[in-house]
Amino acid sequence: MSLPILSLPTLALWYQRNQSHPVKEKRPTIELHVNLWRRIGRQRREHELNYLDVGIKILEQRDLGALNLYVPFPAKQCVVEDLAHLLRENEIASAVFNEVLEVHPAEGTDDTFYIKQNGNHFLSVHSITVDRDVEYLTTFPGAAPAGFVIRLGREFCSKFHAPGEHYIRFRFKLEAEAAHIFSSDVSNEDGWILSSTTTSEITEIRINEVRSIPESVQRLSKMHDWVAPEINAIHYFLVRDISFDLIASHASFRKIRRMEPEWDAYLGPDFPIGSARNMLIYHWRKSNGGGDVGDFVTLAKFRRSKGNVLLYIFLVIALGSIGSGLHSSLSFWLKWRDSPELLWADLFFSPNGGEVVAATIFLIAVAFGLAVVAKRWPI
C-alpha cells in the first residue's frame, strides 16, 4: 500500500525557451510578488476567505517562451482570476507597487495598458483571459502530486518581447482545504474550560525550494526542458486580521503596516466593506544585489485570543448541577438499597430517583458534547 503524498506549501516557477538554438542566452530576469490573504471571521457565521495572489514582473525577457507555475493544491480547490483590471485604477496601482503612479491605455488593444511614474514608462500590464491564455497541467510522470501546474503559453508570453518591463498578476481563490496547506491551527488542549481560548496558527510558504518540489513535477520539468528563471527579488506579503498577533517568524520581516481603505476595492465583494482597515500586512523580501536569489522559505506563527465566557459560565453551572445531582442520586440509591419496600423501578421512575438520575445523565452528556465542540470551534 502506497503512502499518501504530503503536500508542502511550495510554489515553483520555470520558463521554456523561445529559441531552439543550442547556444543559450542569459536567463530572463524576473521579480516575483506573492500575496497570501487569510481572513478568518471573528464570528462563527462569517466565512473564511483565502486568496493567493501572484504577480510576475518581467525585467528582461531574454529568451522567454512560456511560463509554468506549480502550486501545491488541486485545481478543483481553487478558482483562477486575472487581476490586471484592478491595476487600471490609479489608487490601486499605487497601493500595490507602493509608488505614486498613473495608468494610461495602450493604443490598439484592450489587453495591455501602461503604468507611468513621473511621466516615464514604469510597466506594461497585460490582462490574462483565463479560458484562452491559461493551461492546466495535471498529468505527471510517476505518482501524481497534490498540486498542478498553471501554464501561460508562447502566444501570450510573446507580449513580453516588446520594449520595457512587463507585469502580470492573477489570483487563486482558495477553498479551505487548499488554504490549510499553507496554514495549520494549534489550539489549547484545555481551552474549553477557560473563560478565553488561545488559538495558534503556523503559516509557511516555500518558493523554488528544490527539495520541496514533488519528484514527479521535477521529472515533468526535465521532460519539457523547463528552466528556472533568474529571480532577482521575491516579495512575500502575508495579510492577516488585526486580531492575530505575530509571535515568531523564521526570518525578520521588512515592514508591517495597516491596510489602507483603497484595498477594499482590490479585495472584491467577497470581503465585507471596511475589511482592509481591520487587516495588517507583513512584508518579507529577499534580494541579492541584482543576482539570482535562489529559493525562499519563510514561516510565521500567529496567536489569537477569543472569548469563551458563555460556555465557561454554562459549564460552571452544569458542573455544579452535576455535583448536586450526583449527591441526590447517591443519597436516593443508599436509601433504596436499605429499604426493602422500594423496587428497582423506583430507582429510575420515582420522582425523587429517576428524575434526578435522568437530569444528571443529561447534564453530563450536554457538558461533554459542548466540551468536544468547544475544543474544535471555540465560542
Image (spheres, helix red, strand yellow):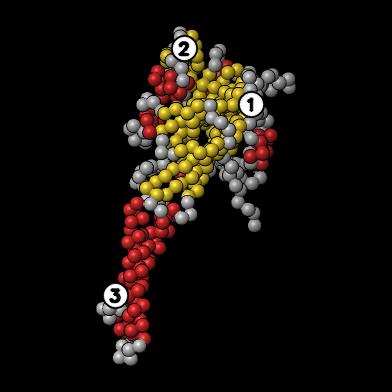
Left or right: residue 273 versus residue 212 is left
In front here: 353 or 181? 353
| Depicted 305 relative to depicted 318: above or below | above
Please state which amino acid type lies under the numbered disc 3: Glu
Q: Is residue 1 visible?
A: yes
In the rendered structure, which amino acid carries the disc numbered 1? Val
Q: Which numbered disc flags the more N-terminal residue, 3 or 1?
A: 1
Residue that numbered label 2 is attached to: 117
Q: CA distance from mark 3 to mark 1?
A: 72 Å
Q: Position of residue 192 (x, y in %)?
A: 42, 55
Identify which residue is drawn at 59% across, 42% down.
8
Residue 174, how many percent across, how many down?
46, 39
Q: Which mark is residue 355?
A: 3
Disc 1 designates what residue?
293
Question: Residue 112 location, x and y as percent?
Answer: 46, 18
Which callout, 3 or 1, points to the residue nearer the camera? Answer: 3
Q: Say above or below: 106 vs 127.
A: above
View extreme (left): residue: 351
Q: How much space separates mark 3 and mark 2, taking CA atoms?
A: 79 Å
Q: Is disc 1 surrounded by few (<14), some (14 to 19) or many (20+) residues within 10 Å? A: some
Please name the residue shown 55% across and 34% down the image.
Answer: 150
Res 79 visible: no
Relative to 110, 309 lies left or right = left
Q: On residue 89, which mark appears? A: none
